Image (spheres, helix red, strand yellow):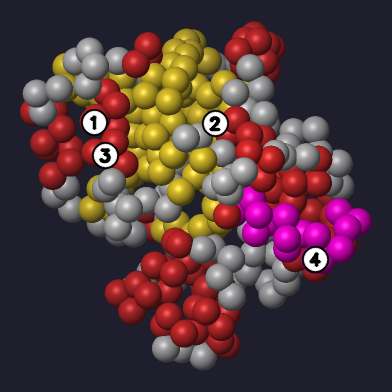
Amino acid sequence: MAPESRAIDRVDRQILHALQIAPRAPFARIATVLGVSEQTVARRYQRMRGAGIVRVLARQEPTHRPKASYWSLRIGCRPGTAEALADALARRGDTSWISIGAGGAEVTCQAEVEGDSGLLHHLPRASTVLTFSAHQMLHHFPGRGEIDWILPDNDVTAEQRLFLAEGPAPRSGDARAEPTDRPLLDELSRDGRASWATLAAATGWSQRQVAHRVGELVGSRAIYFHLDVADELIGVHTAANLWFTVAPAHLASVGARLADHAELAFVAAVTGSANLMAAARTPDARALYTYITTKVAAIEGIHNVEIVPSLIRVKQSHSVMVGGLVREPPR
């Protein structure tokens, strides 16, 4: 891949931001908001996808599966073993957001656990593991940061946001992913922008049936669409996991306020002495320092914050990182 094919300009960043707002928005709608042609949006998206800059994909929401739970694992490793352990974890289908931090001595991993999972039982016994802690996610705080962190200086207006996201009204309800949905979910996990025709071919359903089922699953939050992005290529050079200790009386309000920060891509209440965790993305270490000492410092109820820098990103939501680029995991 030629180096110039990985260059990102303002229009590319605007396309990425529009996709964060509405991952399946038609290219024509994105083009209208950005003031460029539909062909320009389609060409640039395909280039970025092919170059490993972005992948749009669907994920199941574990909190909507009755026997599933979502855990954040902190694994202290023997010197020189963190990379091999992280690579092995990245090959699993039940792991995501794997990074090596704390000076190369700690692996952080998100894991989906369903029933009696061997992962939580076997990891602490591994010879390379020195310390191990598992923190169950109790509540996810969705917010502005999950949309705006890619392009915090964007010029997308509130009206343009509504236009990007317009379409059939989201269906509410208690729809859950069923075994019969597996072909649909597998296809969307590879390409969240797969056409209705492609999804119909994968499932054997009609395009209308596919669109209806996706609407049901999204409306009930059984699935959600997500962008895996090559951080450094879009100007995000510093990443860190933040572990907050918050007074119980302030946990809900602090979580909601943090979720509205553009510097945070993820915020959740978790079990453990640090009862709230967040994933920070900033242009550099100075910006992270400024964020901690201004926005975070202004929030009442936070007693302590531990900052664990991520040195190496091994896996994102569903993509492995290869040379700083997002790629489909090996199957």
Residue range (magenta)? 34-49
Q: Is residue 248 inside the magenta stretch?
A: no
Are the residues flagged by discs 1 and 3 in contact, CB closer than 8 Å?
A: yes
Would you name the residue on which mark 2 appears?
Answer: 255
Q: Say which of marks 1 and 2 sits in front.
A: 1
Q: Which mark is residue 89?
A: 3
User: Residue 144 versus residue 270: which sits nearer the camera?
Assistant: 144
Instruction: Count residues near mark 1 (Cα–Cα under 10 Å), then give few for <14, some for 14-19, many for 20+.
Output: some
Q: Is residue 37 inside the magenta stretch?
A: yes
Quadrant location, the C terminus = bottom left
Vertical relation: 212 (above or below) 123: below
Residue type beneath disc 3: Leu
Indicate which disc, 3 or 2, sits on the residue closer to the N terminus: 3
Residue 73: x and y, percent?
29, 31
Residue 315 seen in the current view: yes
Indicate which disc, 3 or 4, sits on the residue closer to the N terminus: 4
Query: Tag 2's secondary structure?
Result: helix
Are the residues flagged by discs 3 and 2 in contact, CB closer than 8 Å?
A: no
Q: Which mark is residue 39?
A: 4
How far apart are labels 3 and 2 at the CA level? 28 Å
Are the residues flagged by discs 4 and 2 in contact, CB closer than 8 Å?
A: no
Residue type beneath disc 2: Gly
Would you name the residue on which mark 1 appears?
Answer: 85
